[in-house]
Image (cartoon, rainbow, N blue to C red):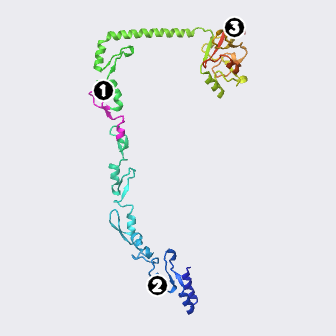
Amino acid sequence: MSYVEFLYELLEIYPDPESEKAIMGSVVYCIHHKQGCQWSDELRKLKAHLNTCKHDAVLCAAQCGAMIPRVLMQDHLRYTCPRRRANCEHCHKEFSGSALEEHQGNCGHEPVYCENKCGAKVQRRHTQQHLQQHCSKRLVPCRHCGQRYTQDTVAAHGATCARAPVPCPQRCAAAPVPRDELDAHLRDHCAAAGVACAYRDAGCRFKGTRAALERHTEESCQQHLALVAALAARQARQLEALRAAVARLALPATGALVWRLPDWAAKMADAGAKEGASLFLNGNGAGEGTHMSVYIKILPGEYDALLRWPFAHTVSFTLFDQSSSPDRACNIVESFVPDPTWKNFQRPSKEPDALGFGFPRFVSHEMLKKRNFVKDDVMFLRVKVDPSKIVAV
């Protein structure tokens, strides 16, 4: 309840002339003081003030039924009154207030942005025409390959399109050919392209147009025959050398393998950083971290059926001292005689088997540093199987 309403209620409760005179003479603010009205005077003058107070609500002048403050009447009549008359700013047709609200957002003359986000702004009634005929983001087919691209990229695609016709780089008389057929054209059909002689692998260096190649082939039969004969002779010598090499590999060997280990420092660092080095440079089992370990393992072969089992040959490992003076060299040699009863030396099967035999403490890391076992970052290790020393079984 406002202060003014309270005073009027007092008048109704206490209709005393003196009280009424005192109350009506009281100074009050306008009931719209909070809305910004600065008027204040005796209560008896309040009604007269409200008849002109711009913040007091009155019936809409257009008789829409709404109570609107006088100060907002013009805006109401212009923008929100459902009975107002207004023109669309785009098509300029006149509408009532409610009809204008329905019309807005549907006016065909209103400019709107293209839904393809090409950046263009067109009247709503022309959007379909724009999308079909003018939009730079509309999809159009490449006239060469038929694939669809946006209109602003189809030209760039044409520069690399596999089916776009391109002229022959040799400037022959043939019509332009699709880009992906150009290599075949140059290889098989171009009259101006340089073509190598069919006997080039035999040594003929001729290269010319197809017409010149035909003449060359007809005129060079003797030359080509000589080149082919020379090629056949070379290939025969190479074949004989290969056969001899294969034969040497098939002969019984001495049973000794000299293993060259380059990049020793890197392999040593790698062996210390992870498990499972080929030679166990950082040691294995009892020698891990202090020694280099070496092992031998019997693997299955193609001639196992003809060999004598169990394996009974003496095996030796030799680490070479690479001293500059051979007389001062001190190689490290370790050997063992296999025990025929051990599973390690029985005929191996095709199934994976991790069993091996050797020396977990073959040579200590300290000894490797004292002598020239590693020189120029290379180590040499010989593994020898002596067939003359066979254990009696």
Q: CA distance from mark 1 to mark 2?
A: 104 Å
Residue at the disc numbered 2: 48
Instruction: Residue at 67% x, 10% y: name it.
Output: 328
Question: Is 169 rendered above or below residue 239?
Answer: below
Q: CA distance from mark 1 to mark 3?
A: 75 Å
Give the label, 1 or 2, closer to the camera: 2
Residue at the disc numbered 3: 389
Q: Residue furthest top?
A: 388
Residue at the disc numbered 1: 170
Q: CA distance from mark 2 to mark 3?
A: 139 Å
Quarter in which the C terminus is drawn: top right
Q: Is residue 325 left or right of residue 112?
A: right
Instruction: Residue at 56% x, 89% y: name it.
Output: 22
Give the amino acid at mark 2. Ala
Residue 218 seen in the figure: yes
Instruction: Give SS at disc 2.
Output: helix
Q: Percent position (x, y) of residue 255?
A: 63, 10
Q: Percent position (x, y) of residue 359?
A: 71, 18
Of marks 2 and 3, which one's residue comes earlier in the chain?
2
Question: Is 200 rendered above or below residue 9?
Answer: above
